[in-house]
Amino acid sequence: MSTLRFHAVKASLNREAVRVTEPARRSDIFGKNVFNKLAMRQYLTKNALDAITEAIEKGSKIDRMTAEHVATGMKEWAISKGATHYTHWFQPLTGSTAEKHDAFFETMDEESAIEKFDGSQLVQQEPDASSFPSGGIRNTFEARGYTAWDPSSPAFVYGSTLCIPTVFVSYTGEALDYKTPLLRALHAIDNAAVAVCKYFDKNVRKVSASLGWEQEYFLIDHALATSRPDIVLTGRTLLGHSPAKGQQLDDHYFGSIPARVMSYMRDLENECMLLGIPVKTRHNEVAPNQFELAPIFEEANLAVDHNSLLMDVMQKVAKRHDFKVLLHEKPFAGVNGSGKHNNWSLRTDTGVNLLSPGKTPMSNLQFLTFFINTIKAVEAYEELLRGSIASASNDHRLGANEAPPAIISVFIGKQLTKVLTELETVTKGKLSPKEKTDLKLNVVGKIPEILLDNTDRNRTSPFAFTGNKFEFRAVGSKANCANPMMVLNSIVAKQLRDFKIEVDALIDKKGMKKDDAIFNVLREYIKTSKSILFEGNGYSDDWKKEAKKRGLSNNETTPDALKVKLSNKAIALFQELGVMNKIESEARYEVEMEEYVMHIQIESRVIGDIARNHVVPTAVRYQNILIENVTGLKTIYGDEFKALAKEQLMLIEAISGHIEAINSLVTNMTEFRKKYNKEPKIDKKAKGYCEVVKPLFDEIRYHCDKLELMIDDELWPLTKYRELLFTK
């Protein structure tokens, strides 16, 4: 065993669980480090508190005077929590969070100083953010990017810093982050959903999208992780032979949580409680050393912020426990990768979940309206929804026998399928009194009973209805939830707008009653949305053939999946809703394609380096040991040595073959990389990296993994899968 690997394994085996002091009740510390309504009541004037409440609930602007009051109160609260600095905390298009810390400290003169934080510092800043990706919206020498306070997501103290959630926009107003388009999409669905809700309840004034994410992740001993250059630089293993035991016994799933992992989870959950992240569920996942954390549902914007914050906090807490968190969608070959299921629903300010049926036919008709419109939205924009989850890392996971396929479909279960089938037979035009009565009593009225027993689920479906919400299962584990949530809320908002136009036209022009008009439009949507509904095995080849017949896209790679973002249909959608203009849409495409290329480029360089500088020299060293053995046998036994050294000679020859193949493949990969680096068009460059460079990874890996099985374990330089996955 190599020296580095030996010490890494030895250190990991000697780890002990860090003792974590937990509060008697989680509720006692929940939100203690958040400038929430409880804190605001203590530190703000009533007028300032009312202004923030108005801004959160209605999106109204906060004037400068109010901002001054809020800044003063926020500063005093933060200092009472031990904060010395503040930062505008934002989410640029890198996929992670960003922050620049400034001290509250200000000098008055040469001899005195104060803690200062005013309204202008709260509301807006101009960070030197020229190096963040912008997709051509601005040049490096045009570095102005502004962060602006988002009052709907409360400020929090982490460590010694007051963190203020903000949007990040260019000098000319284009979005440079994930939060800005999400907020616009949430505003669009609020308006569209409220307008439709008025058919059923005139008292509805606001509709909020809710999100409950399920975060899957791997926990690896820190020393073992840092002994692997590929994990350090790419977040996943590029080489490594599968161990004899993987996940085939299913003994890790929902099993007893190891003591050291439990200690980490408790510490993480304590941090989450203080930061107001309402984590509730924890358990072992399918793969060895894989786990899951899930919270209570929250308003979508806040939920996205909390997930982005969580991914940062997870890593920091892990260091205290000598762990490394792997959020990559596929860090290990041969075992399940990680996803981040996005559970989505809509809730009114009157307390109604629009995707949950009620006790009356009217409330059930409201449920069916939003349920069917969501299905119709996915049918109309399935390719765009697929594009929202595209990334180099998620490509490894989608379509494997562990995650939803790249084909977007909707699963609703047999019982609800039957309901839609019956609704499809509704007479076109005005319904007779008997038809309407039968429909409401026999179909619409029975929906609560149907859902009560509707426990069947389809884990192969990328978009499944699960009782009172839709679960978007195809989102990647390290993705920012804002991107898929922005797309989902946008397409449903667009669909609800179109629905209202059609219903109003039947009421105004055809003289239909409201219920008749709604049933007629829903009836047509059911007919035209059938292609997106699928109840079977999403992993099967038969489904791929069937999906193609139905006209559904199957974009298995990121370059193919992202092309839709440049389509006239997608650009028009976002422009109509005010979510993104054409410049912003095109910029997103450029940023995401560039990111894809850079990820594959980095992995290519890393696998080439490990293969040539770690694997091949080790193979040569072991080959020399074998040659010495064969030479010794020849010296002792003369011509008879060949029979005695038969296995050694075969091994020497096999090692030479693998070494030759590795060097040839790495050389070819390097030359192809150079070729595509010169390609000026990003689509062609990405296509080259995807179809020519990336496939060589598997070929190089094959030969390296074969050598791992041949070479003496004492010599092998890389920490093996059995050590990474089964060291607790």
Image (cartoon, rainbow, N blue to C red):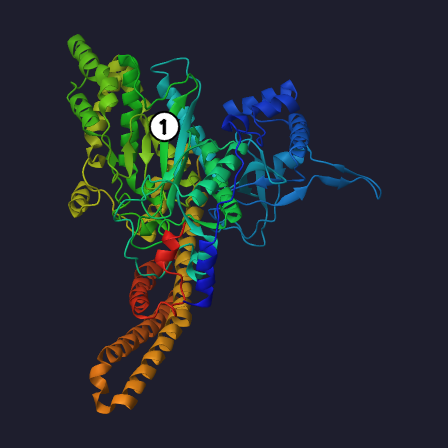
Residue 216: x %, y % from top left: 38, 42
Which of these two is toward me, 583 or 105? 105
Amino acid carrying label 1: it is Ser
Q: What residue is shown with label 1?
A: 345
The residue carrying pointer 1 sits among few (fewer than 14), some (14 to 19) or many (20 or more) residues within 10 Å by Cα, namely many
From the viewer's perspective, is residue 90 above or below residue 437?
below
From the viewer's perspective, is residue 144 above or below residue 72?
below
Task: Find numbered disc 1 in the image and state the secondary structure of the residue it sits on.
Answer: strand
Residue 718: x %, y % from top left: 40, 64
Q: Is residue 607 left or right of residue 357?
A: right
Q: Is residue 394 left or right of residue 583?
A: left
Q: Residue furthest top?
A: 433
Residue 703, image quadrant: bottom left
Can residue 522 be seen here? The reply is yes
Q: How many marks?
A: 1
Can residue 331 be seen here? The reply is no
Q: Residue at x 83, y 41 (%)?
A: 109
Q: Residue at x 35, y 80 (%)?
A: 624
Quadrant position of the N terminus in the picture: bottom left
Residue 64, image quadrant: top right
Which of these two is toward me, 614 or 65? 614
